[in-house]
Image (cartoon, rainbow, N blue to C red):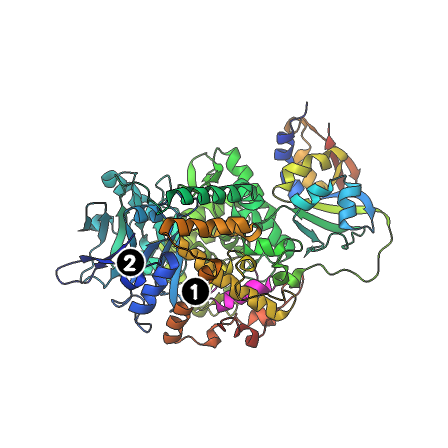
Amino acid sequence: MEKILRVDMGAQGGPKTSLAPLGEYAGLGGRALTSAIVAKEVPPLCHALGAENKLVIAPGLLSGSIAANSGRLSVGCKSPLTGGIKESNAGGMASQTLAKLGYAAIVLEGIPKTDDIYTIFINKDAVKIDIDNSIKGLGNYALIEKLKAKYGDKVSYMSIGPAGEMKLAAASIACTDMECRPTRHAGRGGTGAVMGSKGVKAIILDDTGIAMRDPKDPAKFKEANKKWVDGLKKHPVTGQGLAAYGTNVLTNVLNEAGGYPTHNFTWGRFEGHTKISGETQAALEKERGGNPTHGCHRGCVMRCSGIYMDKYGQYLTKQPEYETVWAHGGNCGIDDLDTIAMLDRLDDDYGVDTIEMGATIAVAMEAGLAKFGDGEAAINFVNQVGKGTDLGRILGSGAAVTGKVFGVERVPVVKNQALPAYDPRAVQGIGVTYATSPMGADHTAGYAVGSNIMGVGGKTDALSPVGQVELSRNLQIATAAVDSTGMCLFIAFAVLDQPETFQALIDMINAFYGLNLTGDDVAALGKSVLKNEREFNKKAGFTSAHDRLPTFFTRDALPPHNIKFKVTDAELDQVFNF
Amino acid sequence: MIDSDKIIQILYPILQKGFWVKALTGISVRQLLEDQFKLSGDFVDLKISTVFLNGKAVDNIDSAIVTDNCELALSGAMPGFVGAAMRRGGYYSSMRSAVSHVEEISKPPIQEGVVKIKLYNTLIPLLGLEFVRRGIVVPQADAAGLLGAELNPFIKTCPNTPDSYVITIK
């Protein structure tokens, strides 16, 4: 993983590739690398779909090794949705495969001079770029089936659906899972539209004949990995709760707290919550011969995903995540798991972000285009996105655009990106992160590792209002660092409670690269990532006015607890004071 | 011989939606769980990491008081930052202070009453059967699907009030 592959899609005579050592980017991986390249090489004021933007695909520092749960992939660019810097994170097999192939990053540059559709095939011997217009317009599922006939099912695929080809701002990039299905997505921020603007429909990664990456100190690495796995397995969340019920286990709890956004963030509770909860979903999957305990990539020991069968016992989609079930479920007033699973399948097939689509449909429902709870209408909306109708293109451009077109004031976005499944009036600390993250509203931006363990930013008075700001800051720093390792963010639960598990993570990185990093060094990495991202956004025209929640969160009380978002603007402006 | 897995499979919708039990009220959540429901202190501390009283997240189960007709939701450890924030007494609990339980200044009387219990996630299989064994009260609408004997060879449903049923194990 010491080289960067650059593909100039706009080169004279057709796409050209070049290889270069990491150079000034040495030591970086995942989000640290994508954000460093975008911040240094992409003009902040460029058009996100123009030749000047770059799509950077980077595995994490430990991807491709035997380190458990190290298979997350970072995809970075200037976002067509937010207009700022973007790092979108995905599971699936691509990160492991790309790392084994030895690439720290693939950078797609320029735009082609024709409307041709390209595939990029990479194996240990060569990089091959072909025009294949026969795959134009295919959904991700049909695309992968077609490509499998040529490349087989032992490779990893990254691809875009019709939404990416249409360069819609909610478009995602699909990564195939262990079963070679296009179910894991770099969903947020419209990365699929940028890939579409480069004319690339699919990247095929073939690691045939390549072993796992070797650590510098195998004995120490093996020992640290064992402690790491033991820590993940013994923790009640990573070892039990997630495996049994998946992330959708949160539905009942958020609903109970009155923080489950319902009917486009109008209420904090959804009457039909038990019909779509993780508990119900897991039981249904078992009953139909699916599987509620399944990893999204090889080497995952938490296995929070699953397989969702339809009522006839046929595969429909992967187990929809909590965010997806919320976005298409309670937020749209839909309490039918089969409808939600179908929406998830369609999102994956057309290649759109499930959070953005769910939030957008709820905005459309508020505009009167359909009634809340109308599952058939929701399915029709997503199908229109896939077909590229006029309405579909509006919806596929996200909640902010849809709200503007249809005159809706209650549009839950920050920096034009839709809020995820936690109402910031109930959980005000996450509201701070939604407001201030360089990514736009993002629940994973302040998600990670125990900042109390890392000691980022010193001691926090958790009972003061400022404490919420400090906690958000520390969490964002820690998350940026974890995103750079290639580790799944769900490791946070074990690391949060078990200092020895956090130490095992640092020991793994040190043993792999022959380093002597400390917790402070990891924190410094997180800070530098955020500084890069903030600097890019500043040059792109972002100011503190963009670090705000929509007004209705501070104006309208959220039932049942009737609470408003109370963190002040002055407090929000203190988040990035380092 | 009862099939506990089957009983849970039949009753999990009711267990998560909520059921009523008779209990002494005016006591702390911990006293309710340990003295009334006979759960061990270790179980309460290690397995019941998230507690809601009337929809508010509880940090201190020794000082939070259950009252007649209150609702108590019990959950295992939850994933995610918000899951960690909801945990009782957790490091991130301040981030959900808007929905945290605040204790009443006046103490309610200790008296016989009813409490609505909701069981979530890992606590459904761990506690569900024991509650059903003691008898749980559910609204008629929720019990309606359980009235066919062939559907539930292990479960007994008896009318309680005109609009509720008691469910126990046969």
Host chain of mark 2: A
Binning the other alpha carbons within 10 Å of mark 1 as few (below 14), some (14 to 19) or many (20 upward) gives many
Picture coordinates of residue A437, whole percent (x, y): 47, 66
Residues B146 and B103: in front is: B103
Q: Is residue A437 left or right of residue A570?
A: left
Q: Which residue appears at 44% of the width and 54% of the height?
A: A354
Residue type highlighted by circle 2: Gly
Dot 2 and dot 1 within a common chain: yes
Say if A13 sits above or below A140 in the image: below
Picture coordinates of residue A506, whole percent (x, y): 45, 52
Say if B150 sits above or below B74 in the image: above
Which residue position holds label 2?
Answer: A196
Residues A364 and A262: in front is: A262
Residue at the far top in the pictured view: B1
Host chain of mark 1: A
Disc 2 secondary structure class? helix
Q: Which residue appears at 32% of the width and 54% of the height?
A: A162
Which residue position holds label 1?
Answer: A439
Per the image, is A300 magenta? no
Residues B59 and A115: in front is: B59
Binning the other alpha carbons within 10 Å of mark 2 as few (below 14), some (14 to 19) or many (20 upward) gives many
Picture coordinates of residue A314, whole percent (x, y): 42, 35
Residues A512 and A436: in front is: A512
Residue at the far left in the pictured view: A13
Per the image, is A429 magenta? yes
Magenta segment range?
A423-441
Q: Which residue appears at 24% of the width and 66% of the height?
A: A51
Disc 1 secondary structure class? loop
Distance from Cα at disc 2 to Cα at disc 1: 21 Å
